[in-house]
Amino acid sequence: MKIIAFSDNKAILSQIISRFRDEAEVHAITPDPDFILKYGASKTFGLKGDVLSGPVSKAIEKMYQSGGYDLIAIGSTVTGREVAGLLSAMLSTQAVSEVNSLSFNGGKATTSRFFYGGKSLLTEESVAKIAVVAPGLAEATESSKKSDITELQLEPSSVKIVSRTDKKGGSVDIEKAQVIVSVGRGLGKKENLEKVEPFAKAVHGEIAGSRPVCLDYGWLSEDRQVGLSGKKVQPKLYIALGISGQIQHIAGMRNSKVVIAVNKDKSAPIFEEADYGIVGDLFDVIGKIKDKLAQ
Amino acid sequence: MAYNVIVLIKQIPDIDQMKTNPGTGEPLIQNVPLRMENLSKNAVEAAVRIKEKNGGKVTVLCFGTEKSTSVMKEAYAMGADEGYLITGYAGNYPSVTANALASKIKEIPHDLVILGNQSADSYTGLLPGSLSAILGEPLLGNAIDIKLQEKQVSVVSALEDNNLEIATEMPAVVSVAQEINQPRLPPVLQIMAAGRKPINQVAASNLQVPEVKTISNRAPKSDRKRIVYEDPAKGIEEVSNVIREAIR
Ligand SMILES: Cc1cc2nc3c(=O)[nH]c(=O)nc-3n(C[C@H](O)[C@H](O)[C@H](O)COP(=O)(O)OP(=O)(O)OC[C@H]3O[C@@H](n4cnc5c(N)ncnc54)[C@H](O)[C@@H]3O)c2cc1C
């Protein structure tokens, strides 16, 4: 088998390569070739030029048409999904999106993805040749397999970059955290984070949050958002404080090993997705747990 | 200058009201009410604001079924001028949707096509790219701000690690993110007026539904312990032990 793998996110790309390098010849396309080299793709192409969806899709189209590829696997990012949509139309071939598992059987692909905002897991068999891959397809592991870096110059685009602003935050990677203390709207106000921080420290946890907390109110930076439209995390311990447990939130923390929830509403759906739940005021409860842990 | 804007909207089952069959875990969508998809509202809002500021016309397209007239009326109430309901929607096939919409878009003179970046139910995010390729118009994606100047459109595109300001010549396709605006709640008078406004219906032709076999579609299994302490005093001891164990 021969696969083209592209992502502008090096973590997802390293997972795709790790997943397929033993059963397929993987040709990786990346803006970070030096990093990607370690993961054992058969060929590594380093992108030169503006990594915009238009030019990237043209470069992949050209490579695909040079022949013999069974699949184009694309990491699910804003740019990646655009590239997949463009390529699907350019190559008149089907694309399947947000897949979290992917296998092949006689030219057919079996994929699973979440549907209805995460309420169901949809497993399908199709002839899709393009797969948009969600983070966490496989664990990224380094390989001793070596390849050289080939430069791949992107064509100029009719879309021009005017400016680029880094988002605040950026230093945390909650996807790798072993313990996560996640706060929801139950936090009440930004200043209350000060009350959660000592608790997070006591359990050696990173602080994350629901979408309202990270996006609508900006109490936390966006890179700490867990959920369907945020990060997919898989810590050993996930502690949800004042989070109601809407399905879009669950979609991001479902793979946690142990889940603890604190919510003052005993009918909150988060208790359905928790191993241990405490009905009560979150500040009261975390204060007491912290004292207990210190004993 | 005035702009002709086409905005694309989608009708979806109200996911929050959706239940799953407790026996099989399959989603029960039969009697779930239908509503306008979240980002479609942001798209309509963005289009109407452009018209309010610069003049021009907002045309709504919805690829749906005969039941989709209610979302068209909602878009009218928000300020859209004209609408085409393209019937024939038979499921979530982004390539089918892209072609059905593109063939209508090509008949309507326009400067911009605005749509939501990802739909709240299927969440594929494939449509903006596919439309861009079929129409041969550049894509400015996941916009949280749109600016127009003469024939030039620029947007702030929200990427994972940074916000990218990008610009191109119109006609162009712009997909929007939730942060772009707060969709308006139209006043009752406008809702009533919208009810009387005609909706053009056209049937989609030549749909090429791809071969996809559903193997299963079920609520993801959750085998959590679900031990819930209604008395915090009791829970704290046990939960502290669990935490101690987990962080060792
Ligand atoms: C397309 C789409 C994508 C989405 N993506 C995401 C996503 O990626 N991540 C995400 O999180 N959401 C996402 N959402 C939003 C999601 O549907 C919910 O609106 C959101 O998760 C709710 O956040 P919350 O639990 O913090 O707030 P709420 O639902 O308001 O819950 C707050 C909870 O706090 C409890 N509470 C209040 N005060 C206290 C207290 N003192 N002590 C204890 N408990 C208290 C309340 O009982 C309540 O249960 C998405 C929605 C859509 C439509």
Image: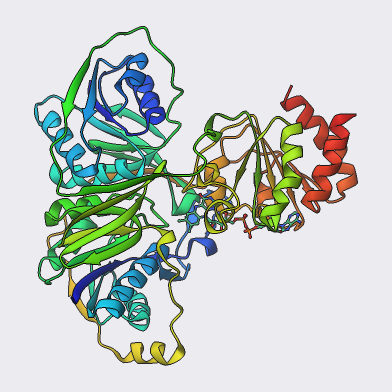
Residue sitting at x 23%, y 45%: B211
Q: Which image quadrant is residue A73 in?
A: top left
Against A84, residue A32 (above or below) is: above
Quadrant for the C terminus of chain A, please: top right
Q: Which image quadrant is residue A224 in?
A: top right
Q: Residue B98 at x, y = what percent? A: 21, 57
Quadrant for the N terminus of chain A, please: top left
How did the renderer colour the structure?
Answer: rainbow
Q: Residue A225 at x, y = what percent? A: 54, 46
Residue sitting at x 23%, y 43%: A53
Q: Residue A34 at x, y = what percent? A: 32, 18
Against A128, residue B9 (above or below) is: below
Q: Is residue B88 visible?
A: no
Query: Is residue A224 found left or right of A61 in the rendered image?
Result: right
Query: Is residue A161 found left or right of B124 in the rendered image?
Result: left
Q: Residue B80 at x, y = what percent? A: 29, 79
Residue sitting at x 15%, y 44%: A157
Along the viewing direction, whichever of B226 and A279 lies nearer the viewer: A279
Against A6, residue B29 (above or below) is: below
Q: Is residue A157 visible?
A: yes
Give the quarter the ligand 1 occupies: bottom right
